[in-house]
Image (cartoon, rainbow, N blue to C red):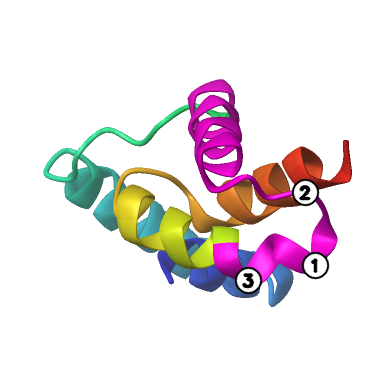
Amino acid sequence: QRKDSITAFEGAGRQDLADKEKSEMAVLQAYLPKRMSAEETLAAVKAIVAELGAAGPGDMGKVMGVVKTRLAGKADMGQVSAAVKAALAG
């Protein structure tokens, strides 16, 4: 949410509010668990796809259900979705 706010404030020319959001986000990130890298996310998704025997884009819902429960709070869900699409495409 803070990232969205920063983008909105910067787009509106309110750098003062964007800076405030950035500083608050930095403080909060110190208390959050470390997020998985894009490579770690892709590897985890590929392992889940293999485990489920998912074969193509039609299995995306099934894969996303499992991925969300296992990677919630550990990985950025935008990266997760992209990794699932990539893993099921090829």
Look at the image and tell me in which quarter the C terminus lies. Answer: top right
Q: Quadrant of residue 53?
A: top right
Which residue of the protein is positioned furthest toward the front in this rendering?
53
Q: Which residue is mark 3?
A: 61
Q: Position of residue 12 (x, y in %)?
A: 69, 77
Is 57 in the magenta?
yes
Can you say which quadrant of the picture contains the N terminus?
bottom left
Decide: few, some or many residues near mark 2? Use Cα within 10 Å; few <14, some 14-19, many ≥20. Answer: some
Labelled disc at residue 55: 2
Judged from the image, the secondary structure of the residue bearing numbered disc 3 is helix
What whole-number distance in Å separates the C-alpha atoms at marks 1 and 2?
8 Å
When the figure is inspected, residue 43 is found, relative to residue 2, above or below; the finding is above
Q: Any magenta on residue 56?
A: yes
Asked whether the beta carbons under mark 1 and mark 2 sit within 8 Å of each other, the answer is: yes
Residue 44 in sight from this viewpoint: yes
Give me the C-alpha separation between circle 2 and circle 3: 12 Å
What are the residue bounds of the magenta stretch?
39-62
| Amino acid on which disc 1 is placed | Gly
Secondary element under disc 2, as helix, strand or loop, is: loop
Image side of residue 35 versus residue 78, left or right: left
Q: Secondary structure at mark 1?
A: helix
Of 30 and 69, nearer the camera is 69
The percent position of residue 55, horizontal first and vertical second, equals 77, 48
Is tag 2's residue or tag 3's residue first in the polypeptide sequence? Answer: 2
Q: Does residue 16 appear in the picture of this structure?
A: no
Residue 58: mark in rendering: 1
- Which residue occupies 82% across, 53% down? 56
Residue 9 x/y as whole percent: 58, 72
Q: Residue furthest right?
A: 90
